């Protein structure tokens, strides 16, 4: 990810992993986005928190995915130091972009100038 996402990482102040809800984090035992973020060579900032649990996005059509994550994230106090910065959101998979979009919206509202996204995988619909 670091090599292939170099253009996205250039000029960024930090990476922000997409957070899991605390109950999901306890259940899973790790946050895959945070694990990926630690290997990208930039400071990792917990700039977001998941404020409500959401059902897994797997199997949901695009419209339901967007509704599922609407208002599921909030900025943390750490995001205050990112005003006018460029940040890179990190997640494991992007299917419709609903989660990344919901996170980016919160960060922009918190004053982040530019939000980029880097994922380990992208789902491509054949058809």
Image (cartoon, rainbow, N blue to C red):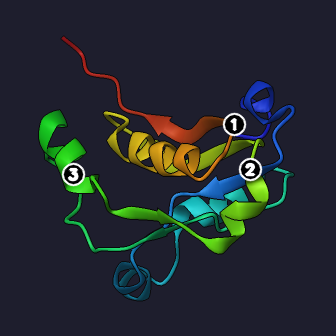
Q: Secondary structure at mark 2?
A: loop
Is residue 73 left or right of 33 when viewed as pictured?
A: left
Mark 1 Cα shell of 10 Å, populated few (<14), some (14-19), many (≥20): some
- Residue 18 is at least partly visible in this image: yes
Q: Which mark is residue 83?
A: 2
Q: Residue at x 35, y 86 (%)?
A: 23
Q: CA distance from mark 2 to mark 1?
A: 7 Å
- Residue 61 is at least partly visible in this image: no
Whether label 2 touches label 1, CB < 8 Å = yes
Name the quadrant of the C terminus: top left
Name the quadrant of the N terminus: top right
Is residue 84 left or right of 109 when viewed as pictured?
A: right
Q: Which residue is mark 1?
A: 113
Is residue 100 left or right of 44 when viewed as pictured?
A: left
Q: Residue at x 67, y 44 (%)?
A: 112
The image shows residue 71 at horizontal and vertical percentages of 31, 58
Q: Earlier in the sequence, mark 2 or mark 1?
A: 2
Q: Which residue is mark 3?
A: 58
Q: Is residue 98 above or below residue 23?
A: above
């Amino acid at each position: 990810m670091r090599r292939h996402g170099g253009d996205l990482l250039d000029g960024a102040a930090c990476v922000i992993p997409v957070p899991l809800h605390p109950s999901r984090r306890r259940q899973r035992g790790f946050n895959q986005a945070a694990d990926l973020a630690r290997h990208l060579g930039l400071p990792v900032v917990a700039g977001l928190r998941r404020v409500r649990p959401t059902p897994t996005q797997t199997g949901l059509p695009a419209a339901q995915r967007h509704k599922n994550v609407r208002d599921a994230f909030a900025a943390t106090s750490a995001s205050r130091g990112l005003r006018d910065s460029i940040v890179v959101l990190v997640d494991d998979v992007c299917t419709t972009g609903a989660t990344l979009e919901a996170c980016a919206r919160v960060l922009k509202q918190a004053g982040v100038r530019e939000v980029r996204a880097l994922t380990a995988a992208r789902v491509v619909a054949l058809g």
